[in-house]
């Protein structure tokens, strides 16, 4: 496939996913605001927080529209300056590339926080009080801190370098028919070579990678630890004298959270980790790197669906909405048929 065609496909997927993501997440926020039962408590604020962020994520993806590329020990994300929304302000292109990466770190923090909250609910911990006061702002700041770490690790430590530019110039022209000098990029070059052709470690780039890996590892440990602990507590509550409706709601919320967390693991974590590891191992991905662009764009479209279709109150409201749309469509179609027949 011609490089330009493949890039256009990636951009079209990004634009389409942005529009769908905004609609779906806005609909979920409507459900959270108007169809949440009292037993949901302050968890609805975390759900709304997540959906709001996913709208922001989609908008940043739309504005940045980066393309991923990997060759040997190089991994980078770039934007062709002339096609960017910020072509007249080139400095902003990489700022949005950095914000795009910050979104990834924010996602990790969001789901760690949700699993921790579900665990506190299942355990009926006294710490739940901190989610019912102004202290909830502290908890909500954790994903933003995680995102800030990723912004620093990419925008600062993965800033463009002449060594990386010269190394990738010929390859990106061959694979994608793009002149690297017409782009703005953030990238990592793990093992450049000196004048004698001897590879050496690029400390700045390795540091960026280690920061990202550390944050990723801590987040995954938190998700699995609190996820397993939450499941055990829910199982215990099933045999206690807790109301059936409460048990059902907690189970729905937990399974929705598991599904909602599996989605970013598949669409975000695995692709990004894979392309990092391939760069460290010196394996070329070439055109295949663009798959990461597509999976990252799909994430905010698919991620809200478990909450919509697993949580009972939201599912019923969604069915009612669909019935209304179908009824309205049938009414409009009949009206058009009748008016046309009499004309």
Image (cartoon, rainbow, N blue to C red):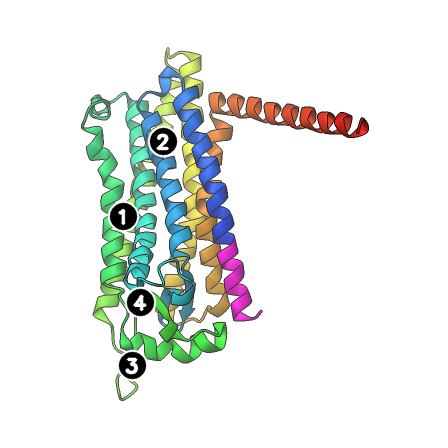
Say which residue label 1 marks. Answer: 147
Judge the density around disc 1: few (<14), some (14-19), many (≥20) Cα neighbours within 10 Å: many
Camera-nearest label, 2 or 4: 2
Looking at the picture, does residue 218 appear above or below residue 256? below
Asked if the magenta segment contains residue 5, the reply would be: yes
Q: Secondary structure at mark 4?
A: strand
Distance between the alpha carbons at the discs numbered 2 and 4: 35 Å
Q: Earlier in the sequence, mark 1 or mark 3?
A: 1
Q: Which of the two residues, 24 or 73, is positioned nearer the viewer here?
A: 24
Q: Secondary structure at mark 3?
A: loop
Distance between the alpha carbons at the discs numbered 4 and 1: 18 Å
Say which residue label 2 marks. Answer: 48
Q: Earlier in the sequence, mark 2 or mark 1?
A: 2
Judge the density around disc 3: few (<14), some (14-19), many (≥20) Cα neighbours within 10 Å: some
Tell me, yes or no, if residue 210 can be seen here: no
Q: Which of the two residues, 187 or 180, is positioned nearer the viewer here?
A: 180
Distance between the alpha carbons at the discs numbered 2 and 3: 48 Å
Say which residue label 3 marks. Answer: 193
Camera-nearest label, 2 or 3: 2
In the picture, the quarter occupied by the C terminus is top right
Name the residue located 35 percent from the left edge and 59 percent from the top edge.
86
Residue 242: x and y in percent read 37, 12
Say which residue label 4 marks. Answer: 188
Q: Secondary structure at mark 2?
A: helix
Tell me, yes or no, if residue 179 can be seen here: yes
Asked if the magenta segment contains residue 198, the reply would be: no
């Amino acid at each position: 496939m011609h490089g330009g065609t493949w890039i256009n496909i990636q951009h079209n997927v990004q634009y389409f996913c942005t529009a769908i993501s905004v609609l779906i997440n806005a609909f979920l926020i409507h459900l959270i605001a108007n169809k949440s039962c009292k037993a949901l408590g302050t968890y609805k604020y975390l759900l709304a927080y997540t959906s709001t962020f996913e709208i922001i994520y989609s908008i940043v993806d739309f504005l940045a529209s980066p393309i991923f590329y990997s060759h040997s020990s190089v991994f980078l994300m770039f934007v062709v300056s002339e096609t960017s929304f910020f072509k007249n302000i080139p400095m902003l292109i990489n700022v949005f590339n950095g914000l795009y990466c910050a979104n990834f770190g924010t996602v990790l923090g969001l789901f760690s926080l949700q699993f921790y909250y579900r665990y506190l609910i299942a355990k009926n911990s006294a710490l739940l009080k901190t989610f019912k006061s102004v202290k909830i702002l502290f908890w909500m700041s954790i994903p933003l801190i995680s995102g800030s770490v990723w912004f620093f690790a990419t925008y600062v430590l993965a800033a463009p370098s002449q060594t990386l530019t010269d190394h990738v110039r010929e390859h990106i022209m061959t694979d994608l028919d793009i002149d690297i000098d017409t782009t703005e990029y953030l990238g990592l070059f793990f093992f450049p070579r000196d004048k004698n052709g001897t590879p050496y470690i690029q400390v700045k780039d390795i540091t960026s990678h280690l920061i990202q890996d550390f944050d990723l590892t801590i987040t995954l440990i938190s998700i699995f630890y609190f996820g397993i602990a939450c499941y055990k507590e829910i199982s215990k509550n099933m045999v206690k004298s807790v109301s059936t409706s409460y048990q059902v709601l907690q189970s729905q919320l937990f399974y929705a959270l598991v599904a909602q967390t599996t989605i970013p693991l598949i669409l975000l974590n695995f692709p990004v980790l894979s392309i990092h590891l391939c760069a460290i191992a010196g394996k070329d991905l070439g055109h295949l790197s663009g798959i990461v662009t597509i999976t990252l764009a799909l994430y905010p479209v698919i991620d809200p669906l478990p909450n919509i279709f697993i949580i009972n109150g939201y599912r019923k409201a969604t069915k009612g909405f669909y019935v209304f749309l179908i009824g309205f469509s049938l009414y409009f179609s009949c009206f058009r048929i009748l008016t046309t027949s009499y004309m």
